[in-house]
C-alpha cells in the first residue's frame, strides 16, 4: 500500500515520467495523461470528411523568422497535426510559395503577402492575428500573420481550435485581437507551497528547487495559458510575504519569467506594503517618506535587472489586516502612486485592489469600497489600475455588480473574478463559472446612459482608457488534472476566453471547451453544454437563492453556516448578511436601510431600491422581506425560498442523469470521476437545503410547502458538523 502511495506521490508532478511508467508496465489506462492535457487533447478527428479536408490543406508549414515563440508555434502545429489528422507535416523556412501554412509576422512578409493582408493587419493590435486563405501562384495557402510573434502563437491556437472543433478551414479570413491588455491569473500561492483558497493540491511553484530545476509543469502551464490568450501571472498571494522581493527569491522568479516569456506571459508579484521595514531594515513604510520612496525605487531597479520585462505589482493594502498607507495616516492614492512612480521608468504597472472594508466602519460592508475609492477618481498615476471584485461583498454564487464599476470614469478599473471556487463548493461541485462572469460583464451600469456595460468599462472603450485588464484568482494546483475537478478546467479556459473577449457568450465557451476536451459528438456536446450552463443557477438555488449571500460556514467557507454569529468582526458572521427574524429575511440596502442602492446610477438604483421592481434574483440582497411577501409567481416568500432550495437539489439530480446518459462518449476514468463528484454534489445540495431551511424555519414558523422533501437530519446535527482540515484555509 505504502509503495503504491509513494508511486502516486512521485508521479504527481511529472506526467512524462508517468507516461514512461505506463508504457513500461503496459498499463492500459493512460487516463491521468488525458486529464493533464486539459483542452489541448488533440484527439484524432473522427469525421472522415473533415480529415480529408484538413489533410489536403495542412501539407507543410513554412515559418519566416526565428524567435523562440515562432518555433514554439510551428512545433505546436506539427504536433497537433500528428495527433489530429495523423500526419507528419514537414516544417521548413523555405520560400512561402512552397508552403500550405505560412507563419510570419508583418515585418517578415514579402511585398506580395503583405499586399494580400494589409487591410486586415491594420485592424489588429500588437497581440492580435490574421488567419487568411490567400492565393499564391494560384494555389490556396493559409497565412497566419500578426504584428508581433506572440500574435502568431495566438493565431495557431485559434487555427487549431477550428480543427479541434471540426470547423471548416477553407476560405478563412479571421481578424482577431484581445480587447484587454492585462489578462492575468492571480495565484494566491504562499512561499511554503500552500495555496490560499486552493483546492487542487499544493502550489505548482516549487520554490525550493527553483531556480535550477524547471519543472515540465511550468512549460505546460505557459502553453495552456497562451492557448487561451492569458498574458500575465501574479505568482504569489495577495496576503503577501516580503521575502519574494529578496534576491534569493528574485533569482527564482527570474527563472519562471524566462520560462514563460516565449509564451507571451509576463510575471508580476504582490508587494507587501511593509517590505521596506521587513526586508529593508527601515523603521517605516510611510509612502511619503523619501527614504521609503527611494527604497522602492531601488527595489524596482533591482527587480528589472533580473526580469527586464517584469509586469508590475499587485497590492492588497489596508484590507483584512494587511499593512498599507493608512498605517501612516496616508491614503490609497499615496500608497499606489508611490509604487507607481518607482516602477514607471521601467514600464511596470500597479494593480491596486479595492477590496477594502473595516471593522471600525459601522456602515454596510457592501458600501465601504465605493465610499473609500470614489473620492480618489482621477488621482492615480497613469500606470495604476484599480482592481475591483465582481461584486461588493466577496465572490458569492451571485452578487449584483460592484457599484464601483461606472463610478470612477477617470480611473482604469480591472475586473477581479475568482476562478477557484471558494464559496461555490471548492473543487467538489461542478459549477461553470463563465455564466457568472458573463452576467457581470453584461450588466448595464448606466454610467453613461443605457448600454454602459461592465465589459465596456473593462475594455476601456466606455471611458477611453488605454490600460485595461481582467484578473482571475487561479484554481490551479499540483493535482494531476490541475484544477481538482475535470470540469473546473472549463473555468480556467473560460476565464481566458472572456479576458480576451469580454463579449463572448458562455454557451459558446462551454461548447468549444467540451469539443476540445472530450468529444465532438453532438449527442455528447449538446446535453453536457446545457448541464454546464444550468450548473451556475443550480448552485445559487441550493446555496443562496433569491439574493441570499455569505451564509457559508465561516473560515473555510464550505457548506452552510447561516447560524454563525460569534465571530469577532460582525461582518464575518452569516447572521449579518441574512438578518432573518420573525418579520422576514434579507439585508435592507434600500433607502429605508443602508441605502447601498444609492451607490448605483439612478436608473439602476431605482430598480434595486423598489421591492416591486428589484429582480427577484437579487431580492434579499437589497431588501428585508416579510415571510408572507408575494413573489411574482404568487408564492409567499417562505414557500418560494423553500422551493428554490428544492429546485437546486433537483437541478443537481438532472445533472446526474445527463451525465449517466453520456457514458458512451467519455473515457472511463473521467466518467467515473465526474460521476462520483456529482454524487457528492447531490448529497451536499440536500445538506444545504435542509440546514438552511431548518434554520430559517425557526424564524418563519411555517411548514415546508408541498414539493419540498423532508429534511434528512436535525438542525442540531447540521450545526455540529466541523471541518477543521478543510483545504485552502491557512
Ligand atoms: C476572501 C478570501 C481571503 C482573501 C480575500 C482577498 O476569503 O482568503 O485573502 O478574499 O481577496 O475571499 O483578499
Image (cartoon, rainbow, N blue to C red):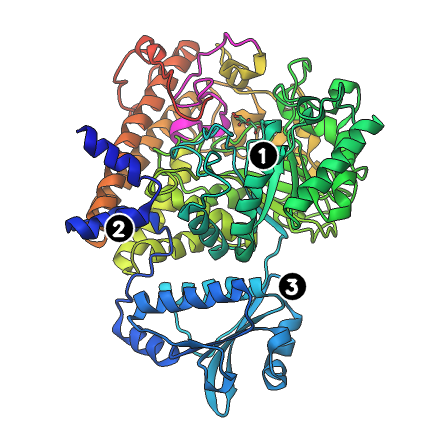
Furthest toward the bottom, the residue is 137
Image quadrant of ligand 1?
A: top right
Please provide percent x and percent y for residue 408. 74, 39
- The secondary structure making up most of the magenta span is loop
Please provide percent x and percent y for residue 650. 30, 34
Residue 73 lies left or right of residue 532; in this view the side is right
Which numbered disc, 3 or 1, marks the residue closer to the eye?
1
Furthest toward the front, the residue is 212
Which numbered disc, 1 or 2, marks the residue closer to the eye?
1
Residue 609 lies left or right of residue 154; in this view the side is right
Please provide percent x and percent y for residue 620. 52, 25
Residue 167, above or below 448? below
Q: Which residues are magenta?
A: 541-568
Name the disc covering residue 125, or none.
Answer: 3
Name the disc covering residue 19, or none.
Answer: 2
For marks 3 and 2, the one nearer the N-term is 2
For marks 1 and 2, the one nearer the N-term is 2
Q: Viewer-proximal residue, 625 or 70?
A: 70
Amino acid at each position: 500500500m505504502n509503495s503504491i502511495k509513494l508511486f502516486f506521490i512521485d508521479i504527481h508532478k511529472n506526467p512524462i515520467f508517468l507516461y514512461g511508467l505506463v508504457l513500461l508496465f503496459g498499463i492500459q489506462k493512460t487516463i491521468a495523461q488525458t486529464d493533464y492535457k486539459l483542452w489541448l487533447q488533440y484527439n484524432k478527428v473522427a469525421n472522415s470528411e473533415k480529415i480529408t479536408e484538413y489533410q489536403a490543406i495542412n501539407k507543410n508549414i513554412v515559418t519566416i523568422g526565428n524567435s523562440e515563440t515562432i518555433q514554439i508555434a510551428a512545433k505546436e502545429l506539427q504536433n497537433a497535426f500528428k495527433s489530429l489528422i495523423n500526419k507528419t507535416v514537414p516544417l521548413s523556412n523555405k520560400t512561402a510559395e512552397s508552403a500550405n501554412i505560412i507563419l510570419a509576422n508583418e515585418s517578415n512578409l514579402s511585398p506580395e503577402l503583405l499586399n494580400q493582408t494589409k487591410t486586415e493587419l491594420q485592424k489588429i493590435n500588437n497581440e492580435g492575428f490574421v488567419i487568411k486563405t490567400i492565393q499564391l501562384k494560384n494555389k490556396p495557402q493559409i497565412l497566419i500573420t500578426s504584428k508581433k510573434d506572440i500574435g502568431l502563437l495566438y493565431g495557431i491556437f485559434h487555427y487549431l481550435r477550428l480543427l479541434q472543433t471540426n470547423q471548416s478551414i477553407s476560405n478563412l479570413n479571421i481578424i482577431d485581437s484581445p480587447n484587454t491588455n492585462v489578462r492575468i491569473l492571480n495565484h494566491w500561492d504562499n512561499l511554503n507551497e500552500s495555496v490560499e483558497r486552493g483546492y487542487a493540491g499544493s502550489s505548482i511553484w516549487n520554490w525550493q528547487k527553483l531556480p535550477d530545476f524547471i519543472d515540465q509543469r511550468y512549460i505546460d502551464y505557459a502553453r495552456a495559458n497562451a492557448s487561451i490568450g492569458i498574458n500575465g501571472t501574479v505568482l504569489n498571494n495577495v496576503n503577501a510575504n516580503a521575502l519574494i522581493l529578496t534576491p534569493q527569491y528574485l533569482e527564482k522568479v527570474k527563472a519562471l519569467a524566462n520560462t514563460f516569456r516565449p509564451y507571451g506571459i509576463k510575471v508580476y508579484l504582490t508587494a507587501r506594503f511593509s517590505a521596506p521595514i521587513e526586508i529593508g531594515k527601515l523603521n517605516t513604510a510611510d509612502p511619503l517618506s523619501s527614504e521609503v520612496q527611494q527604497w522602492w525605487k531601488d527595489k524596482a531597479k533591482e527587480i528589472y535587472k533580473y526580469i527586464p520585462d517584469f509586469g508590475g505589482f499587485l497590492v492588497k493594502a489596508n484590507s483584512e489586516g494587511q499593512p498599507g498607507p493608512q498605517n501612516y495616516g496616508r491614503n490609497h492614492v499615496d500608497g499606489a502612486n508611490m509604487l507607481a512612480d518607482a516602477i514607471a521608468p521601467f514600464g511596470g504597472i500597479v494593480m491596486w485592489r479595492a477590496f477594502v472594508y473595516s471593522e471600525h466602519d459601522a456602515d454596510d460592508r457592501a458600501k465601504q469600497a465605493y465610499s473609500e475609492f470614489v473620492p480618489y477618481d482621477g488621482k492615480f498615476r497613469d500606470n495604476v489600475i484599480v482592481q475591483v471584485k465582481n461584486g461588493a461583498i466577496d465572490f458569492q454564487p451571485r452578487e449584483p455588480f460592484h457599484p464601483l464599476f461606472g463610478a470612477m470614469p477617470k480611473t482604469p478599473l480591472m475586473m477581479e473574478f475568482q476562478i477557484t471556487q471558494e464559496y461555490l463548493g471548492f473543487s467538489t461541485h461542478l459549477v461553470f463559472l463563465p455564466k457568472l462572469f458573463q452576467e457581470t460583464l453584461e450588466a448595464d451600469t448606466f454610467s453613461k446612459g443605457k448600454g454602459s456595460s461592465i465589459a465596456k468599462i473593462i475594455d476601456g472603450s466606455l471611458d477611453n482608457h488605454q490600460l485595461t485588464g481582467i484578473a482571475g484568482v487561479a484554481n490551479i494546483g499540483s493535482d494531476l488534472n490541475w484544477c481538482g475537478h475535470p470540469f473546473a478546467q472549463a473555468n480556467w479556459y473560460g476565464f481566458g476566453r472572456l479576458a480576451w473577449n469580454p463579449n463572448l457568450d458562455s454557451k459558446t465557451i462551454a461548447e468549444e471547451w467540451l469539443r476540445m476536451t472530450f468529444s465532438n459528438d453532438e449527442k455528447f456536446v449538446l446535453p453536457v453544454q446545457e448541464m454546464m450552463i444550468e450548473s451556475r443557477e443550480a448552485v445559487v438555488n441550493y446555496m443562496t437563492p433569491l439574493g441570499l449571500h455569505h451564509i457559508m460556514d465561516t473560515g473555510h467557507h464550505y457548506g452552510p453556516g447561516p447560524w454563525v454569529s460569534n465571530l469577532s468582526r460582525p461582518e464575518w458572521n452569516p447572521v449579518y448578511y441574512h438578518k432573518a427574524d420573525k418579520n422576514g429575511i434579507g439585508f435592507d440596502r434600500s433607502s429605508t436601510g443602508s441605502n447601498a442602492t444609492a451607490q448605483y446610477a439612478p436608473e439602476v438604483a431605482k430598480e434595486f431600491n423598489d421591492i416591486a421592481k428589484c429582480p427577484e434574483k437579487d431580492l434579499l440582497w437589497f431588501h428585508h422581506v416579510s415571510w408572507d411577501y408575494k413573489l411574482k409567481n404568487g408564492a409567499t416568500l417562505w414557500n418560494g425560498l423553500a422551493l428554490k432550495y428544492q429546485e437546486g437539489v433537483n437541478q443537481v439530480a438532472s445533472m446526474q442523469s445527463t451525465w449517466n446518459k453520456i457514458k458512451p462518449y467519455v473515457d472511463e476514468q473521467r466518467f467515473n470521476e465526474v460521476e462520483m463528484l456529482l454524487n457528492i454534489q447531490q448529497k451536499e445540495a440536500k445538506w444545504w437545503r435542509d440546514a438552511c431551511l431548518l434554520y430559517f424555519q425557526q424564524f418563519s414558523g411555517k411548514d415546508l410547502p408541498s414539493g419540498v422533501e423532508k429534511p434528512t437530519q436535525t438542525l442540531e446535527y447540521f450545526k455540529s458538523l466541523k471541518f477543521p482540515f478543510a483545504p485552502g484555509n491557512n
